[in-house]
Structure formats: C-alpha cells, structure tokens
Image (cartoon, rainbow, N blue to C red):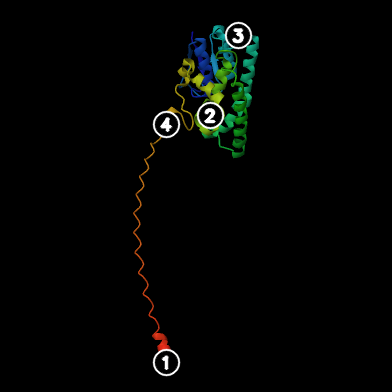
Amino acid sequence: MPMKLYAQAGNYKTKKALICAQYAGLDIQTPTGGPAAQTGRIPVLETGEGCIFSSVAIARYLARVNRLAGLYGQNLLEGGMIDSWVEFCSHELEVPLSTWVLPVQGIYPEVPEATKCAKEDVKKALTVLNNHLLSNTFMVGNSMTLADISVFCALLDAMQLVLDDGFRKPFANLMRWYNLCLSQPEFKAVVGDVKFCGGGAAAAKDAKPKQEAKPKQEAKPKQEAKPKQEAKPKQEGKGKKEEKKKE
C-alpha cells in the first residue's frame, strides 16, 4: 500500500520528504485538490500503520525506513552528526531564510530591519557550511544523507529568488556541493531544473542579447590653417621729416 503525503506541493519541506522517498525506493502519493483541512500547513504522512506529522519527523522516518539507502549514516556517530546538521538547518538556516524569502514570495509583508538582519544571519550560516565543505564532499560521511537533503531543500527557494551571483560568489565550496546534489537523479526527479537567481544556464537564455556598439565615426580631418599674410613693411618716415626740415 503506497503512503500518502498531505502537504503543499511546492513547499521545500514537501520536496525534502519526496527526495528521501526517492532514495528509500518508496512509493508516495501526494493527493491534490483536497479541502484546505486535508492539505493544511502541517504536512502529514499517512502510512499503513498510522500517521506522522511535522516535516522533520516525516523526513527522519523516511530516511530510516531503508537502511541500505544510508540516509541516516553508517553508524551511530554519523547518525548523531546528521541530527546535528538537521537541527542547524532548522534553527540557523531556515529561520533567517524565511524572513528574507517569504516577503519576496508575497506571503508576508517585508520588514526592512528584519530583512537586513536576516541577510547577515544567512551569510554567517553559509560561511559555516562553506568552511565545512572545504574538506568534505558530503555533509556527513561519504554519501548522500538526510543532512544533505535537509540543507539542500532549505536553500532551494533562496537559490532561485534572493541569493544572486554576488551573494553566492564567496561560497565556492557550498556551490560545488549544491551542484553535486542537483546532478543526482533522486534530486532531479523531485526538483527538476533549478534556475539560479541572477545567473545560470536557464537565465542566460532569457537575457536579451547585447546590441553591438555602433562603430565610431571617423573624425573629419582638420582644415589646414591658412598661412598668415606677411605684414606689410612699415613706410619709413619721410626722410625723418626731411631731416627736420634741413634744420
């Protein structure tokens, strides 16, 4: 019997659960068109044995269903490290990102002071992730885990709406890891092609080609200056007034 996930289809938290299901090889249906009470704010996963609510709880459950998928690590230590990053994601990343992104999506009115603080908090969180990924290919261990899926999905809306080229530039390690996640078939099956804010291949197609600069007109040659007429010699005084009238 397939599980049913009642949640908002476009929400990044829903995509987090669906990516986990892809790795676990689970068939999950996402009913659409139901009443608001059925697809409410809190996602609910309906299983054959009962229901689970809260996006984090659902993701943790799906990550543990198939141990062979390795989404919860290879041992207890890795499981604890994954929990650490999931908590970091919830408190240090998702909170400021929501403050910044939700007004852009038109869900809440913007409070400029809050947005300014949120940008600084996001920058601090991305710096932590970038430093961690300097010497790590994945968030935990040597394969994709729930930690990678959680951080990736938390950043999904921001990557498309607010984190432009200039903001992303200092975080080369983070972007290398993010593109690695995007290349995985399990991620691609859920999120499809992601168009980065202010750049990326998809954005380049939409950009209008620059008009070629018109060649500068050659400057007209300056006309040669006409030669100055020689000054006429002054007439000598008439014999110095005829030598002062012969004195």
- Residue 246, labelled with which disc? 1
Residue 189: horizontal and vertical position, in percent? 45, 17
Residue 201: horizontal and vertical position, in percent? 43, 28
Q: Secondary structure at mark 3?
A: loop
Q: Quadrant of residue 84?
A: top right
Residue 53: horizontal and vertical position, in percent? 58, 17
Mark positioned earlier in the residue sequence (3 or 1):
3
Of circles 1 and 2, the one toward us is 1
Left or right: 146 as drawn, with respect to 206? right
Residue 105: horizontal and vertical position, in percent? 51, 32
Quick one: 237 or 32, which is closer to the camera? 237
Q: On the image, numbered disc 3 is attached to which residue? A: 74
Using the rendered image of the protein, determine whether residue 54 is visible from the camera's viewpoint. no
Q: Secondary structure at mark 2?
A: helix
- Badges 1 and 2: C-beta atoms under 8 Å apart? no
Q: Quadrant of residue 226?
A: bottom left
- Real-space Cα separation, disc 3 to disc 4, in angstroms: 41 Å
Q: Residues within 10 Å of mark 4 (few under 14, many from 20)?
A: few
- Real-space Cα separation, disc 2 to disc 4, in angstroms: 19 Å
